[in-house]
Image (cartoon, rainbow, N blue to C red):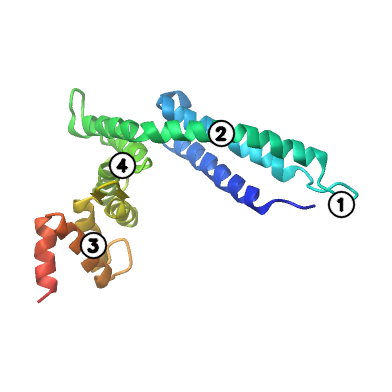
Amino acid sequence: MCRINSWAIIYDGSAKLCSSTSEKLHCYNIKITDLSIPEQQLVRVTRSLAGAVKIIIDTPMLSKDGQLSNEAKGNYAELMLEMPKYRSEYEKFNFHEQTVAESLYNEGESSYLGREKDIDEKKAFEFYSRAASLGYAKAQYKVARCYEFGRGVNKNMTNASLWYRKAAELYAAAVMGHARAQYKFGLCCEFGRGCPKNVELAYKSYMKAAQQGDKDAQQKIQRLNH
């Protein structure tokens, strides 16, 4: 039976996002009601989209006479009518996600630093992780530090290196990546901490940080140039 490959790709991506979201909720012991309204909207619309696309994939495209089946035409037309709604929901989430991410990050800071409450590094890591998953560079940097020093989570230099790199390479609007993360990722590369040793990549990361005024990175560049 014929299948539309592009729909299969869309479903695969949507299903993976659903699975990843469910796993994270279970991993951090977070209930769906603990999420912000925009986060809940994203979970719902992603699951809905994955389900709708699955119907397309599971429907035989051709009838017995070799023509496009009426059922397939109907399902496709119905999904096309729903697509603007999915797009609108995603745009709403994208509009709010940076505000949500900043709020989650601030909650993490409160738990990590003990602002208005007792210090709770595990809770801080959970909030940092949620903000980091929304592409918030400051939170990604804090997640990396938590992994590097075992704050609220077991030490894992491989994960630390990964999150330093995410924060270091994040380009959003005029923000040219997180300078301190660029320096830290440079250290990971230079000495092979949690990633393969790569002095050339380390130099590039130091250079990015140095261009943003990081003093340690500037000193590293001077040393490597001599």
Image point (49%, 42%), residue name: 20
Query: Whole-Å distance between the Cαs marked 2 and 3?
Result: 40 Å
Query: Whole-Å distance between the Cαs marked 1 and 3?
Result: 57 Å
Residue under numbered circle 2: 84
Residue type at tag 2? Pro
User: In this view, which residue lies farthest toward the right?
Assistant: 65
Q: Mark yes or no: residue 221 visible.
A: yes
Q: Nearer the viewer, mark 2 or mark 3?
A: 2
Query: Whole-Å distance between the Cαs marked 2 and 1?
Result: 31 Å
Quadrant in the picture for residue 131: top left
Residue under numbered circle 1: 66
Image point (26%, 45%), residue name: 146
Q: Is residue 38 left or right of residue 51?
A: left
Query: Whole-Å distance between the Cαs marked 4 and 2?
Result: 27 Å
Label 2 neighbour load within 10 Å: few <14, some 14-19, many 20+: few
Mark closer to the chain start, 4 or 2: 2
Quarter in which the C terminus is drawn = bottom left
Residue under numbered circle 3: 205
